[in-house]
Image: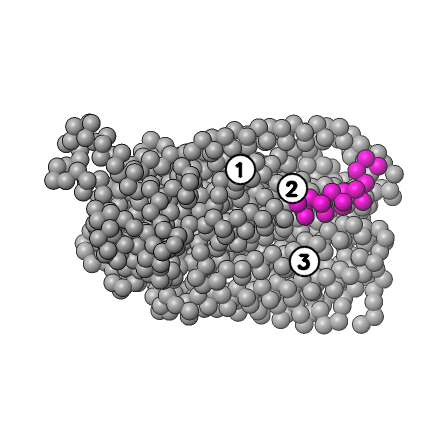
């Protein structure tokens, strides 16, 4: 046994993995329980000191449902989570209410004309009035002064005009915010929506009982009411930087110590394969059936990019696309909903289809009725996409109301989980079916001695993909938004960003072993170690999404430290790139895998840039305090979601196309064009437009307040408008890469049948074919 395997035996690594996952998920669940206990209370009533009833608890909860039905997080944001063209409604309400209350305190004189001592006095009165927690847990009511009740009424009137489109000023703002012109609210719905917005602003400016910070840890930055970063945010930001540097030092030391040993031990015992093992593998019926999945991946990818271009353009024209009145049919909230959902759908479909294709290859047999299951799952996928998208269109265009019908079949309004609950359950059942199909095909590989550990990692990731999506079902129609955010990020962070990456890493490593490019013991050890390192920071790193979502300070502490540790493994990307290159350039037969390997290589680069640099740029608490919901977020999102997971999805797709098409007919020119245009176009999009937009907004957030950074004055000011137009060159280059990829896929899938040869399955993984 090599020194590498001796020092870090697979059995020891499995013990570490099991123990760390118990601790990590146990901690995640424990603090989830704390979120349930400490979430901002929803009162039964909001009353003025003279007894006037402003809002009821039912108004607030129904207002949340109204907000969800009109697109929710796809039309502005709440507590910084959502889209970027419209304001953050919590910060906007807070700012407007504070200005109105300050003017009322100043009386008949304009506040700006008052002497500085009077301004300071009224400013102190304003802070005391708005930060004092007047919620009575016995009566479950919030009490406000009559002056503040008047300020609330004035702010509510502004929002009522905006969402019912009653005035020319409101009509102009609706155009700037890219709100659908015809999908307006009734007065009653606008009243309920105002109740929800008021409550989110109240939680953002009201101090927790026996504390000096608000329920949202003083977010957003709003000097009018004394919202500024508390000392804990500074402390945990510095500690997160310390954890990052310490983690990088430790990991670099480990890699430096093991580098020479790993380099010697990577080669299989019998030497690198001199021929393409997969060239001798028979395509089973279920493997052939996955071809249509990859065709759908291509169609969804193309559609998602087109919708992204339209959605970005709404930021400059509001209601049209180069003069075409597109918003009358597909308003901003619809196109953005579909754009964000398709990003997850096409990438996840590519990975799921890869699992269905690879499982019989690794298991060495075709289970009974496997093709039937693959085809049924495909039909279900189409039904879910069409049904959920239709429901979202109907909801945002106000065809389903804001009640139970919308929740089940329309739009839940939560970013990445917008689809109605019926479609969400249907998708969850489909993922469980996918899990069963992959496991039954992989089962023979688990019974073999060689490579069992690596196969078991694939199994764990497969089961986790099926089960973790179910976390999105843990909240209901009337769930508290803090509770919903907790479970939503289980899906968006752990499911999309965590377990899928483990699954892809294990699958790729298993294929490398099968192809005779890496020793099975080294692959098993490396993947298991990478999984421990990645999930060790990734599980509790989920909390960095929840800093300001009505959660306790402990969430900031955990999120800060562990999100910093998420970046640590990305710092040794050069080592991984070297090892990948060593594996991928051993024999002439590997030329056919040049472009799948190229896309895998780009994943490493974008992992460092998108998840590492841009991720850590915004994730420390102090940075996110000022930048949450600004264009620094889509900078990280585009670089990480497409740059890492999208590129990986394309690489896996091309890997499977090796068997589903004839590589001798592949267009080298189309693949080269696609690879370089996608990478260069993405870099241009980020560096010329998204990142400068985010920096400009961040400066406004630092120097003035968060509401101003998200206001129409900034978003539609000359600087931001110019930077939005600067996205066009990158979009054009990127679109050229998408078109080239689509043309390649069409030619590959319809340009002729792949060769059929006798099966040849290495002993490391394959079981003997079982009888049907």
Q: Please report whichever mark, 2 or 3, sits nearer to the chain's N-terminal start.
A: 3
User: Quarter-wise, where is residue 104 in the image?
Assistant: top left
Q: Which residue is mark 3?
A: 463
Q: Residues within 10 Å of mark 1 (few under 14, many from 20)?
A: many
How many numbered marks, from 0 up? Answer: 3
* In the image, residue 496 above or below residue 439: above
**Residue at image mark 2:** 536
Q: Is residue 460 magenta?
A: no
Disc 2 vs disc 3: which is toward the camera?
A: 2
Left or right placement of residue 596 versus residue 525 in this view: left
Give coordinates of residue 557: x percent, y percent: 53, 37
How much space separates mark 1 and mark 3, taking CA atoms? 30 Å
Q: Quadrant of the N terminus?
A: top right
Query: Is residue 554 among the parts visible in the rendering?
Result: yes
Image quadrant of residue 204?
top left
Report the predominant secondary structure element of the magenta stretch.
Answer: helix
Mark 3: secondary structure: helix
């Amino acid at each position: 046994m090599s020194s590498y395997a001796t020092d870090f035996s697979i059995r020891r690594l499995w013990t570490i993995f099991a123990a760390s996952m118990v601790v990590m998920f146990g901690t995640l669940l424990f603090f989830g329980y704390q979120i349930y206990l400490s979430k901002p209370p929803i009162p039964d009533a909001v009353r003025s000191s003279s007894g006037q009833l402003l809002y009821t608890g039912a108004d607030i909860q129904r207002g949340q449902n109204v907000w969800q039905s009109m697109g929710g997080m796809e039309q502005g944001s709440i507590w910084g989570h959502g889209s970027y063209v419209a304001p953050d409604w919590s910060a906007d309400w807070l700012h407007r209410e504070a200005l109105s209350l300050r003017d009322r305190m100043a009386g008949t004189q304009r506040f700006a004309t008052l002497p500085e001592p009077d301004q300071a006095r009224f400013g102190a009165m304003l802070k005391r009035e708005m930060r004092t927690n007047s919620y009575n847990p016995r009566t479950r009511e919030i009490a406000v002064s009559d002056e503040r009740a008047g300020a609330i009424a004035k702010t509510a009137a502004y929002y009522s005009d905006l969402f019912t489109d009653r005035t020319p000023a409101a009509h102009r703002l609706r155009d700037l915010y890219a709100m659908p012109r015809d999908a307006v609210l009734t007065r009653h719905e606008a009243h309920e929506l105002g109740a929800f917005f008021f409550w989110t602003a109240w939680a953002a400016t009201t101090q927790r009982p026996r504390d000096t910070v608000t329920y949202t840890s003083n977010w957003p930055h709003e000097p009018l009411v004394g919202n500024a970063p508390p000392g804990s945010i500074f402390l945990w930001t510095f500690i997160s930087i310390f954890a990052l540097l310490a983690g990088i030092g430790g990991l670099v030391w480990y890699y430096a110590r093991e580098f020479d040993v790993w380099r010697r031990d990577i080669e299989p015992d019998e030497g690198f394969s001199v021929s393409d093992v997969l060239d001798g593998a028979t395509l089973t019926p279920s493997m052939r059936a996955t071809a249509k999945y990859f065709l759908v991946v291509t169609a969804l990818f193309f559609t998602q990019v087109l919708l992204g271009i339209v959605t970005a353009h709404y930021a400059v024209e509001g209601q049209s696309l180069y003069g075409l009145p597109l918003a009358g049919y597909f308003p901003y909230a619809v196109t953005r909903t579909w754009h964000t959902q398709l990003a997850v759908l096409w990438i996840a479909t590519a990975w799921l289809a890869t699992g269905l294709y690879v499982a019989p290859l690794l298991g060495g047999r075709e289970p009974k009725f496997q093709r039937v299951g693959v085809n049924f799952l495909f039909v279900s996928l189409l039904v879910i996409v069409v049904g959920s998208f239709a429901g979202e269109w109907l909801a945002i265009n106000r065809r389903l109301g804001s009640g139970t019908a919308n929740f089940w079949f329309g739009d839940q309004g939560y970013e990445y989980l917008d689809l109605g609950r019926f479609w969400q359950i249907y998708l969850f059942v489909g993922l469980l079916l996918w899990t069963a199909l992959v496991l039954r095909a992989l089962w023979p590989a688990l019974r073999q001695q060689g490579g069992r550990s690596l196969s078991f990692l694939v199994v764990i990731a497969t089961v986790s993909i099926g089960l973790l999506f179910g976390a999105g079902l843990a909240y209901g129609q009337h769930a508290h938004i803090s509770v919903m955010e907790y479970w939503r990020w289980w899906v968006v962070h752990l499911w999309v960003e965590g377990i899928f990456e483990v699954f892809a890493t294990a699958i790729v490593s298993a294929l490398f072993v099968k192809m005779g490019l890496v020793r099975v013991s080294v692959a098993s050890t490396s993947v298991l170690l990478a999984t421990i390192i990645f999930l060790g920071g990734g599980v509790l790193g989920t909390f960095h999404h929840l800093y300001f979502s009505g959660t306790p300070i402990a969430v900031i502490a955990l999120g800060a430290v562990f999100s910093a540790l998420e970046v640590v493994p990305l710092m040794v990307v050069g080592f991984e790139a070297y090892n990948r290159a060593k594996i991928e350039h051993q024999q002439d037969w590997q030329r056919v895998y040049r472009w799948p390997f190229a896309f895998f290589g780009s994943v490493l680069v974008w992992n460092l840039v998108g998840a590492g640099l841009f991720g850590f740029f915004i994730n420390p608490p102090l940075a996110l305090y000022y930048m949450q919901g600004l264009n620094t977020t889509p900078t990280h999102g585009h670089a990480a979601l497409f740059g890492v997971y999208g590129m990986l999805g394309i690489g896996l797709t091309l890997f499977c196309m090796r068997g589903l098409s004839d590589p001798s007919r592949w267009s080298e020119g189309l693949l080269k064009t696609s690879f370089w245009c996608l990478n260069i176009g993405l870099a241009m999009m980020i560096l010329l437009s998204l990142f400068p937009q985010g920096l400009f907004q961040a400066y406004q957030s630092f120097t003035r307040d968060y509401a101003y950074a998200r206001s129409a004055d900034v978003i539609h000011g000359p600087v931001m408008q110019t930077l939005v137009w600067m996205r066009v060159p990158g979009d054009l280059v990127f679109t050229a890469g998408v078109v080239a990829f689509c043309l390649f896929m069409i030619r590959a899938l319809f340009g002729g049948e792949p060769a059929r040869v006798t099966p040849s399955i290495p002993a490391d993984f394959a079981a003997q074919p079982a009888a049907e």
